[in-house]
Image: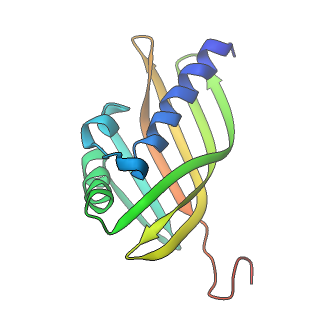
Amino acid sequence: MNSNTIAGIDDVVGRFFAAFDNRNGRVPSIDALEALFSPTSVVASHSGSAVSICTVAEFARPRVLLLSSGRLVNFSEWETQAENQVIDSLAIRSSKYSKSGQLDGRPYSGSGTKFFQLARVGGTWRIAALSWIDEVVSPDGPNA
């Protein structure tokens, strides 16, 4: 695995997390987010035993709306740990992440794991599939 490969993957994943940042007047964009994905990518959200699978547009629209509505402010999401597996034009990245902001005037935070499947097409890395699961925090705090 060469450093250009990792730099390309880091760039795509970094721009993915940055796409949800609305701090300091940033305005999230569906177009900026969709540009990171291949045209037929899928996104899967896992919550307990339920799994929701959707297109990139179906994933992006409600999030961009929430981030631009004024309900969720000062929001950012960032990677805290990552592992890459790369074979030629295929890469899998496991990302631990955290997020924070204010939702409806109250502190909002969380963490979880995202799995990116990336494909290098024409020399450019694109997200082919994304799955994630947020950590569940009990009302009494983490791991209670």
Rendering coords of residue 5 (x, y %):
60, 17
Quarter of the figure that contains the C terminus: bottom right
| Residue 40 in view of the camera | no
Residue 86 occupies quadrant:
top right
Residue 36 occupies quadrant:
top left
Quarter of the figure that contains the N terminus: top right
Which residue is the extreme one toward the right?
Answer: 144
Residue at 69% over, 82% down:
141
Q: How many marks?
A: 0
Q: How is the image coloured?
A: rainbow
Rendering coords of residue 58 (x, y %):
26, 53
58 to the left or right of 125: left
Rendering coords of residue 68 (x, y %):
27, 57
55 to the left or right of 144: left
* Residue nearest the observer in this picture, 85 or 25: 25
Rendering coords of residue 140 (x, y %):
68, 88
Residue 45 occupies quadrant:
bottom left
Q: Is residue 102 above or below residue 37?
A: below
| Residue 107 in view of the camera | yes
Q: Is residue 19 above or below residue 68?
A: above
Residue at 56% over, 46% down:
115
77 to the left or right of 136: left
Q: Is residue 32 above or below residue 95?
A: above
Q: Is residue 107 above or below residue 91?
A: below
* Residue nearest the observer in this picture, 132 or 77: 77
Which residue is the extreme one toward the bottom?
Answer: 140
* Residue nearest the observer in this picture, 100 or 134: 100
Residue at 46% over, 25% down:
119
Residue at 39% over, 62% down:
73
